[in-house]
Image (cartoon, rainbow, N blue to C red):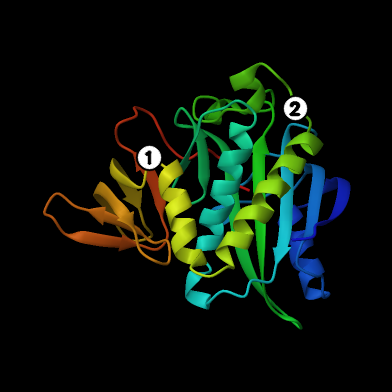
Amino acid sequence: MNFNILRFDTIGSTNTEAINQARLGAEEGLCIIARQQNAGRGRQGRAWISEKDAGLYFSVVLRPGIEIRFLPLITLMAGVAVFDTLQECDLKPDIKWVNDVLIGEKKISGILAETVETPKGLAVIVGIGINLKSSNFPPEIEQIATSIESETQRLLNAEEVAATLTKFFSYFYGILNDVNGPKNILGEWRRRSSYFSGKSVRVVLENETVTGTTDGLEDNGALRIKTSSGLIKIIQAGDVENLRTSGAGIAAHDS
């Protein structure tokens, strides 16, 4: 994949800008990177706190050739790319289904994938936020979020992290679009996530809450939960909480 990066000092949302560019005909690989967002957002309209130079705020335009039913795997693929990026920063990350990357159960990164119809066909916008430092965290998320600086005592700049991220993103996106790509990405995700199976979780859905143990993923990336009665619930979207970690939850950061 060839990346064409547009850099902004301050922007409302990198995802919104990427959506607008896709509608104007942007090619696959167009990236929006900003030093600051004043309207960053995540899943379900949550805010992504985006102080200047405190994080990598990154969005990329994709025009995938995979079957529509496999589009949710793009979020999992992005999680794998972020995982490997953080490993190169001397961190030991984990991926929580579906869009969070953690360090010791604290959120360090969030991913937001959005689809948009364009004159050139369907585009997928993948937004990724990675916390570089924690100094801007409000009190309500200090205990459930972390940053590269907090974990390594080193402050990396966004350009360094973006260069590593685009390398891994291109590699795993190539795998996803190749023969047996969906199956291979599921395998990559499985090897990196403690949430794949055997994790006691609570999943908060729009109209119910499901408690049980993770039992792998469906071929489209949906999460399988085995309840105490042995019933398998298939979760297409929802907020996952690890029941074994006291006070764990979803940080107010998404992407």
Residue 125: percent from left, percent from top: 67, 63
Q: Residue at x 35, y 47 (%)?
A: 196
Q: Is residue 73 left or right of residue 23?
A: left
Q: Secondary structure at mark 2?
A: loop
Compared with 158, 10 (above or below) is: below
Compared with 28, 230 (above or below) is: above
Give me the disc on residue 194: 1
Can residue 134 be seen from the camera position used here? Answer: no
Q: Quadrant of the N terminus?
A: bottom right
| Residue type pointed to by label 1 | Ser
Name the residue carrying label 2: 156
Snapshot quadrant of residue 17:
bottom right
> Which of the marked residues, 2 or 1, is nearer the chain's N terminus?
2
Compared with 163, 41 (above or below) is: below
Q: Is residue 11 left or right of residue 201?
A: right
Q: Secondary structure at mark 1?
A: loop
